[in-house]
Image: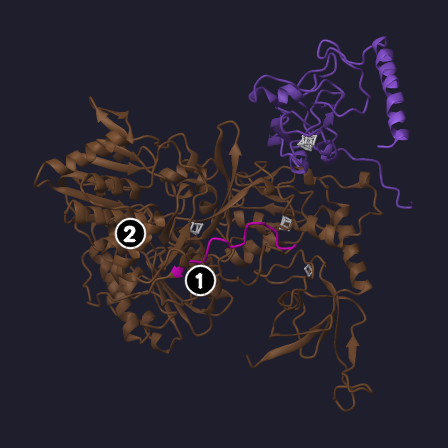
Chain colours: A purple, B brown
């Protein structure tokens, strides 16, 4: 090492001390999670939420496309058939079992992308934690959001013909573009 | 072959037999022309226009009638001005076909755009999604965007039950008529039809009960969309989530090849069969199954299954360990000298079980009393084998010049898929059909000659040298199907030997496509009788061991009864020891079909509880009684059986798993025949040789009341297994 380099190294040491000294008088960035929570951006991909329509029916139609898209194989769906007397979702099919293994999930959001009804959404809500492996398998009742105020939960009894379609029409494609 | 027709498809030359359609010719060289309404097993109708191609033929000079050639000496092709359907146009010499030109591509896009105008596009909840020809072809050939308004779609009923087995979604139907044509052309149950026209066109059923057919499940396989679904599989799972295991149906003598599709059921934590699909084997079931084979699988996971050994204590059957049950049995068999032991082996068990039991009883226990159940086929199983079809017999080659004789059997009720195939030999390929029965059967519809006799007098009829059976000498081949309806053992034997004699006298014996075809009651009757032979039946015994015996009449009266069973049958309820057995879905093994084809099935599910294969129990007790047997698995047992049981000599367990290319290729890489599990990955099996057998004539006897009043054979018999099926249990007779 030549003299010039040695000199530069020596001058850096007090600079380092100065930085540390400065930080000692600043507000710490550490938060006492989980007692204290940091704000998240609105698009943060946290734990999943299964959404409902305004009338309380579940958006999820049990198609298992999320499970097919999931690179971590974290989702398990079993479907069953709706009737007008016992209806969970619009159309014929609903998710009888819907489970996400949060230990497997890598929060990539592919399930959101795959979902034809925007039923599964990764929300900026706290990260799932638990003491046992079993408790990290979130079941449908844990994932499903509560119905809007004054709206009945599922299953509902619905009039015949009102909810024939599982996937509601989206606006027509403008073929001129 | 000499008379090949040569044509070029996209410039690639191909030679195919006369009469081949363009789509099939293209298939031979790996050119997939998309189709919806065409199905290689059905007659073409040209309804969907998906297969439009450019077709040209060599230009002929009208004056000289010579083929015109250009300056370079190439044949000039006269292209047809419009596109034509490749599925209805047979090839002709020198034909040229173009399948990839812009106009063809545009036509495909347009057809798909139109098909999708009234399609609901609800693939996410559609049971066909993932193995749907419409999905596949839309991805491969579709326009990607529609000029029609999505909100303008016509909405129809999505939940129309066509009977209790099949549901119709009217929106999804693309009116290809594959289902209607299957019912008309193959099953000959004309219960489906189109109703109304244009956009209002819908599939209707007009039978009572709805969709009254034994073959309805097949329409859900060949439907190119999810318009037809089964009550059994509706919304049960997505096709890609299912694990597929090759298996063989054991519910009748046909031995259809199946694929068991399984998935975990979270509420019970077990692997369950979600659906049973046909596995292509052109020698056995082509791509068909009857509804019994398709829907009866529920017994494999029924709550009624026996899961642990039971031992009678204080007058009640109580759960016990295998160790104590095996010890109890071996003590029982070991201690008392001169004990009279009788074994009865039911025809629902696999060959491996039958063989190791027989070996155990004859070698270790040294008892002469080993018999099979039901008892009746003992009367004719040896004749049926010795005079059976040749090793290379192929139903598909039966046609003009051949004669099919059905005596005393109801093909549709007793061997449904043979019914389909033999019916086609008669109706489509011109074989002559002679039907003799004391009542009407469905096969009577196609008969050229019908003979009738009094119930129970089938053998007498054959012995009387009837006029209907004359002239068989001139036939190319003669297949004789026979059943034991209303016959007691002497008459069943007399019938079989009488028919065998007719075959011999007509000079038909020994031809590969000629022979007897017995309508056995179950899937392994032939196999069990191959192993057991005529056997010796005991009426009474000190110890009786019943393996898979369904009929209480076959059980000897015994002081101590051991029963190996799946379910708590009446016999099991009165037994002293009950050993839990495994269903064919939970283990490996082989079955021998009525036409002597030995086929392997594979374990699709884990064993229920502590149930074990029957051969394992036989081996464990043999070991406790001093035998030094060590068969680790079914393969080893099969090898032992092949070494000892004549007809199976030379067969290897691995050889039975040999796969042969199947034509037409259905499923697999094909985008348009639908279904993902037709592919035969489990082997096509091998037919055993007829071997030597008795050729003595047996005189018919007087019919007995017992035989005459036996219930008529029916597909949906009130059987234990069928009763447990959620969907066809209701159709039991
Ligand atoms: S976020 Fe990604 S890993 Fe997690 S469940 Fe969804 S698809 Fe699977
Ligand atoms: S969350 Fe969406 S993708 Fe997943 S099963 Fe439900 S509807 Fe289908
Ligand atoms: S139900 Fe299926 S097979 Fe029948 S016509 Fe409609 S699309 Fe074709
Ligand atoms: S025809 Fe016989 S072997 Fe074939 S599926 Fe039906 S019951 Fe099973
Ligand atoms: S018109 Fe040829 S496949 Fe339908």
Q: Nearer the viewer, residue B437 or A151?
A: A151
Most common SS among magenta residues: loop
Disc nearer the start of the sequence (1/2): 1
Structural crowding at the residue carrying mark 1, measured as other residues with C-alpha within 10 Å and reported as few (<14), some (14–19) or many (≥20) = many
Asked if residue B678 is among those painted magenta in the image, a careful observer would answer yes
Q: Is residue A1 left or right of residue A84?
A: right
- The residue that appears at 20% across and 67% down in the rendered structure is B697
Query: Is B180 above or below relative to B238?
Result: below
Residue B542 placement: quadrant: top left
Image quadrant of ligand 5? bottom right
Ligand 4 within 8 Å of the CB at mark 2: no
Image coordinates for residue A159, horizontal then vertical, percent: 68, 24
Question: In the rendered structure, the residue with mark 2 lies on which chain?
Answer: B
Q: Residue at coordinates 76% horizontally, 55% vertically from top-left? A: B111
Q: In the image, B733: left or right of A91?
A: left
Which chain letter matches label 1?
B
Q: Which residue is mark 2?
A: B528
Whether residue B138 is in magenta: the answer is no
Residues in magenta?
A: B671-686
Image point (75%, 22%), residue name? A123
Label 1 belongs to which residue?
B422
Q: Check chain identity for marks 1 and 2: say if they share one.
A: yes
Secondary-structure class at tag 2: helix
**Near-viewer residue (A140 or B421):** A140
């Amino acid at each position: 090492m030549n003299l010039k380099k040695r000199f530069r190294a020596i001058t850096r040491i007090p600079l380092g001390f100065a930085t540390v000294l400065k930080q000692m008088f600043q507000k710490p960035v550490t938060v006492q999670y989980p007692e204290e929570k940091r704000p998240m951006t609105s698009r943060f991909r946290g734990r999943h939420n299964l959404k409902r329509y305004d009338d309380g029916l579940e958006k999820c139609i049990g198609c298992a496309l999320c499970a097919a898209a999931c690179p971590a194989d974290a989702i398990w769906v079993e479907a069953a058939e709706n009737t007008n007397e016992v209806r969970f979702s619009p159309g014929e099919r609903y998710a009888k079992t819907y489970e996400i293994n949060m230990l497997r999930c890598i929060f990539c959001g592919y399930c959101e992308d795959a979902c034809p009804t925007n039923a599964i959404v990764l929300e900026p809500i706290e990260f799932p934690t638990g003491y046992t492996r079993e408790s990290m398998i979130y079941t449908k009742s844990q994932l499903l959001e509560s119905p809007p105020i004054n709206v009945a939960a599922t299953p509902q009894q619905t009039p015949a013909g009102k909810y024939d379609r599982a996937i509601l029409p989206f606006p027509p494609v403008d073929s001129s573009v | 072959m000499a008379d090949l027709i040569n044509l070029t498809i996209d410039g690639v030359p191909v030679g195919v037999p006369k009469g081949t359609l363009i789509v099939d010719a293209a298939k031979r060289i790996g050119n997939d022309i998309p189709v919806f309404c065409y199905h290689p097993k059905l007659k073409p109708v040209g309804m969907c226009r998906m297969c439009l191609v450019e077709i040209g033929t060599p230009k002929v000079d009208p004056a000289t009638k010579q083929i015109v050639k250009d300056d370079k000496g190439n044949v000039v092709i006269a292209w047809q001005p419009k596109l034509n359907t490749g599925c209805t146009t047979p090839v002709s010499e020198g034909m040229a076909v173009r399948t990839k030109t812009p106009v063809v591509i545009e036509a495909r896009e347009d057809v798909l755009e139109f098909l999708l105008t009234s399609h609901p596009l609800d693939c996410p909840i559609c049971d066909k999604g993932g193995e749907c020809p419409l999905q596949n072809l839309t991805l491969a050939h579709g326009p990607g965007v529609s000029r029609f308004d999505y909100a303008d779609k016509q909405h129809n009923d999505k939940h129309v039950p066509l009977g209790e087995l099949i549901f119709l979604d009217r929106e999804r139907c693309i009116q290809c008529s594959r289902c209607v044509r299957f019912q008309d052309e193959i099953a000959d149950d004309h219960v489906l039809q189109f109703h109304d026209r244009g956009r209002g066109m819908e599939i209707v059923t007009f039978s009572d009960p709805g969709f009254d057919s034994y073959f309805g499940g097949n329409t859900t396989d060949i439907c190119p969309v999810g318009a037809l679904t089964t009550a059994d599989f509706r919304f049960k799972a997505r096709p890609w989530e299912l694990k597929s295991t090759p298996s063989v149906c054991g519910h009748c003598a046909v031995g259809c090849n199946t694929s068991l599709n399984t998935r975990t059921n979270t509420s019970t934590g077990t692997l369950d069969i979600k659906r049973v699909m046909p596995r292509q084997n052109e020698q056995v079931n082509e791509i068909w199954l009857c509804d019994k084979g398709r829907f009866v699988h529920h017994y494999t996971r029924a709550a009624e299954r026996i899961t642990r050994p039971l031992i009678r204590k204080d007058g009640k059957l109580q759960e016990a360990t295998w160790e104590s049950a095996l010890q109890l049995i071996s003590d029982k068999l070991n201690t008392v000298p001169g004990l009279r032991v009788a074994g009865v082996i039911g025809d629902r068990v696999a060959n491996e079980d039958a063989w190791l039991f027989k070996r155990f009883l004859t070698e270790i226990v040294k008892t002469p009393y080993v018999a099979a159940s039901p008892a009746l086929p003992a009367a004719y199983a040896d004749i049926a084998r010795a005079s059976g079809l040749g090793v290379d017999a192929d139903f598909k080659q039966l046609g003009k010049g051949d004669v099919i004789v059905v005596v005393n059997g109801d093909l549709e009720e007793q061997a449904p898929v043979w019914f389909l195939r033999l019916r086609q030999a008669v109706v489509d390929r011109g074989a002559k059909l002679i039907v003799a029965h004391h009542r009407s059967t469905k096969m009577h519809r196609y008969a050229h000659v019908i003979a009738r006799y009094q119930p129970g007098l089938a053998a007498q009829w054959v012995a009387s040298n009837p006029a209907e059976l004359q002239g068989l000498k001139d036939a190319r081949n003669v297949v004789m199907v026979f059943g034991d309806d209303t016959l007691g053992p002497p008459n069943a034997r007399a019938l079989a030997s009488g028919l065998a004699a007719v075959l011999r006298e007509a000079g038909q014996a020994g031809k590969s496509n000629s022979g007897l075809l017995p309508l056995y009651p179950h899937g392994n009757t032939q196999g069990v009788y191959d192993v057991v032979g005529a056997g010796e039946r005991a009426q009474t015994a000190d110890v009786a061991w019943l393996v898979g015996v369904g009929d209480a009449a076959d059980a000897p009266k015994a002081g101590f009864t051991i029963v190996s069973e799946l379910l708590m049958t009446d016999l099991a309820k009165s037994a002293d020891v009950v050993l839990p057995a495994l269903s064919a879905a939970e283990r490996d093994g082989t079955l021998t079909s009525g036409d002597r084809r030995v086929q392997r099935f594979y374990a699709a599910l884990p064993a229920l509880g502590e149930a074990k294969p029957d051969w394992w129990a036989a081996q464990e007790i043999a070991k406790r009684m001093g035998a030094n047997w060590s068969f680790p698995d079914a393969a080893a047992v099969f090898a032992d059986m092949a070494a000892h049981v004549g007809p199976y000599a030379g067969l290897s367990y691995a050889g039975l798993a040999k796969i042969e290319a199947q034509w037409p290729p259905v499923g697999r890489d094909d985008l348009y025949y639908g279904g993902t599990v037709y592919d035969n990955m489990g082997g096509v099996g091998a037919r055993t040789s007829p071997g030597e057998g008795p050729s003595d004539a047996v005189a018919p006897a007087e019919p007995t009341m017992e035989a005459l009043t036996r219930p008529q054979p029916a597909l949906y018999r009130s059987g234990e297994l069928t009763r447990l099926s959620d969907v066809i249990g209701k159709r039991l007779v």
